[in-house]
């Protein structure tokens, strides 16, 4: 009889210790938003956006899509603006 009493008390103790929690809503996967424009630069189809490397020889192509190839970094490379 004593075995059943100890087992029953232990089972009740475990029920009281485990709080009931509703499952959390699944989180949306966060991914970087890529905002680029499909463009034809130098005869090739590319996805262009501000800050990307650019070739000065294709400056007129970039201007067609509202960007300019004028920002020069410390290494002498140009970036779209």
Image (tube, rainbow, N blue to C red):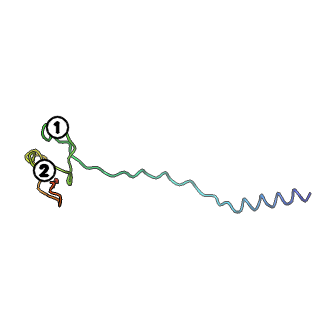
Counting residues from the start of the chain, the first of labels 2 and 1 encountered is: 1
| Residue at image point 14% right, 57% down | 76
Q: Which residue is mark 2?
A: 66
Between 45 and 78, the one lying in front of the other is 78
Task: Residue at 25%, 50% (x, y): give it.
Answer: 35
Mark 2–mark 1 Cα distance, whole angstroms, equals 18 Å
Residue 41 placement (x, y as % from top left): 14, 41
Instruction: Count how many numbered circles sit on residues in the image.
Output: 2
* Quarter of the image where the C terminus is located: bottom left
Q: Quadrant of residue 9?
A: bottom right
Q: Nearer the viewer, residue 6 or 53?
A: 53
Proximity of marks 2 and 1: CB atoms separated by less than 8 Å: no
What residue sits right under mark 1 in the picture? 44
- In the image as oriented, which residue stretches furthest toward the top? 43
Q: Nearer the viewer, mark 2 or mark 1?
A: 1
On screen, residue 15 above or below 37? below
Residue 50 image position (x, y, % from top left): 20, 53
Percent of width and height locating residue 39: 17, 42
The structure residue drawn at horizontal position 65% and vertical position 61%, both measured from the top left corner, is 19
């Amino acid at each position: 009889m004593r075995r059943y009493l100890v087992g029953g008390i232990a089972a009740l103790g475990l029920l009281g210790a485990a709080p009931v929690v509703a499952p959390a809503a699944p989180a949306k996967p966060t991914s970087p938003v890529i905002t680029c424009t499909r463009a034809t630069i130098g005869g090739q189809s590319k996805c262009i956006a501000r800050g990307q490397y650019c070739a000065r020889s294709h400056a007129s192509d970039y201007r067609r899509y509202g960007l300019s190839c004028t920002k020069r970094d410390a290494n002498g490379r140009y970036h779209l603006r």
